[in-house]
Amino acid sequence: MRQNSVRGPRARKSVPGAREKDGTGAPASDGADPSEEAGREGTGGTGKSGSAGGKGGKPGKGEKPAEEETPAAGAKPVEGGKPAKGAKPGEEAAGAEPPPGRRTRAARIARWAALCLAVLVLGTSAAGYLYYQHLNGNLKKDALNLGDKRLDRSAANAAGQRPLNILLLGSDSRNSPENVALGGAREDADRKPLADVQMLVHVSADRSNMSVISVPRDTRVTIPKCTDPADGTVYKETNRQIINTSLMNGGPGCTVAAWEELTGVPIDHFMMIDFAGVVNMADAVGGVPVCVDNNVYDKLSGLRLEKGTHNVKGEQALQWLRTRHGFEDGSDIGRTHAQHMYMNAMVRQLKAGTKLSDPDKLTDLAEAATKALTVDKDLGSVKKLYDLADDIKRVPSGRITMTTMPWVSDPWDPDAHVIPKPGDAEQLFSLVRRDIALDGKDPKKNDKGAGPSAPASPKGSIAVTVFNGTGTATQPVVTGRGADIAAALVQQGFTKATSDSTPRAQADTTLSYAKTSQRADAETLAKALGLPERAVRMSTAVDGLTLVIGGDWRKGTTYPKAGDAAASDGKGAKEGQGSKGGTGSKPGKPSGDKAQGEDGPQDDKPKKEADDKAPESSDPLNGNDTSACMKVNSLNRF
């Protein structure tokens, strides 16, 4: 049984993204309102989209396979061009020279066969190409990041592998008659959509595990300044809105920018799906098994199920993914748990392939997936989607972990909104940034490579290049930060330390080295700066020792310990989130448009690095857990 949420039903307030109550007292958002989510599951559906079509090269029914040109097993060799023993009169012996007339006929037959084969291949290729182009045309594409700054891409590990970070979004758009029919609220047909489902999918660099983090749509966060590429509209940075409204600020690229600011995780791609897409995808895979621990009827979403396991598809799948009042405490937290159960079950089915053995069903899935998706421009082809799905397919179901961002009530609006839970939320984000599996089953990572083959060089011989990576989506660059640290190293005797002004942007400070022989030198530098072991890594992305000062170290010449306000330049963390410098830092006090990020005391003790798994407050669910069953809200039983 999934852990029940501790929060009760929350009233909708008049803030962007929340819904006013109608005359009956029920939230206008529910049932026919845009606030109810279309649950989205992008990874499984797109994974097969490029593989439609039957197998080629096999004979059809009634056709004989082409005869082998090599002698059959046991056939006797022919000597001197004479017929083999047992050959019937008039038969040509293998290797014998046929008469001139027969040679001419054989040549004509060969030419015609070659011509027919060429026409067949070209025709099939043309049909396949046209269908491929058709699927590509189904995809809708948009800009990846609409903020002024992007985090640097995750660095490659010692083997040259990079993790993948994909943001899955569920849009409540009513931009088509089908979406209006499914989602209701016809008066909202022209309203900009909200991103009511948001999941970050992290696939480890070695493809051994996958982590998923959901953020409740009612989470108040900092939404960075975004520019709409369609009309040039500039949306100012704000920390007074909840995260689902970020989609209204120019499109999914603004939601990506908000996620990078919230988590410090660089986003590689996004996939967005709407109401109709969920229904079509659920039908294409033949339904998804889900479980409820009691009879449930949520009249606002329309979901009605008896106690037990059910295979939901079509509109019923959409009802499951949108249901909020029917599960747990009736809040958005329970809904994220239901979405995790659905996503896990869908991934298991797609990996098993039981629904996709029929080419027609596979074609249906390819059509449904490509028509349903809006993706970033770098992911805008069936080939790239297929390659991405192939990467994800390598992850065993048992190494998939679904989580919900740890949260506390928002002190500005405790009945309606949440904010990231100080300490636990940062621990979860930090694990993803460091590419550590949330299930705690990773073998001890050895990004540092084998042990050093030689002792460290003298300080004066260790060359290191220092970059300033302190600027993020909402944090300005600390001017001269790279030069300051390089100067401090020179004062300590590292006379070959230099700074590079090339812009960088990352949440965590890292010290990377390219070869095993440089490990001891890197450890010497780390000790001089007070860097933790996790900051030192071997990477193929650098040529020599490379130090990037991240957003977690904005002040001082010694790396701050967890909870040290120096990590954020003495101002504390930004509203709604802990400092990216440590898992126990306290949020700052309200000042102008900034707010205190919690409503209670907090543990300032640094987290042990041995705690390298998802905190219990994130309610982790394993991908192989088929026993999970949603707890039904007692007010929504029949």
Image (cartoon, rainbow, N blue to C red):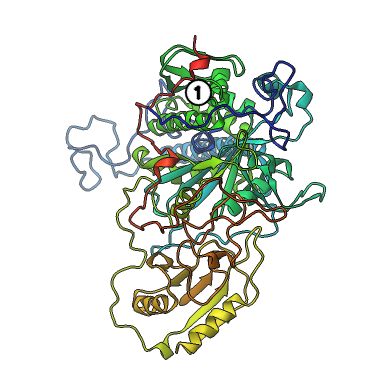
141 vs 565, left or right, is right
Q: As drawn, which residue projects farthest toward the front? A: 601
Residue, disc 1: 327
Q: Nearer the viewer, residue 163 or 429?
A: 429
Report x, y in % for residue 427. Answer: 45, 52
x then y, percent, for residue 212: 47, 42
Please rate how many residues cluster around mark 1, counting C-alpha atoms within 10 Å: few if below 14, some from 14 to 19, many from 20.
many
Please name whichever residue, 202 or 554, is drawn nearer the observer in this view of the structure.
Answer: 554
Identity, as a three-letter code, of the amino acid under mark 1: Phe
- Residue 496 visible in the snapshot: no
Coordinates of residue 311 in the picture (x, y in percent): 45, 18
**Above-or-below relation of 568 to 620:** below
Position in image of residue 108 (x %, y %): 50, 38
Which residue does the image show at 64% across and 62% down from the upper left?
Answer: 475
Give the position of the N terminus as an image quadrant.
top left
Residue 345 visible to the viewer: yes
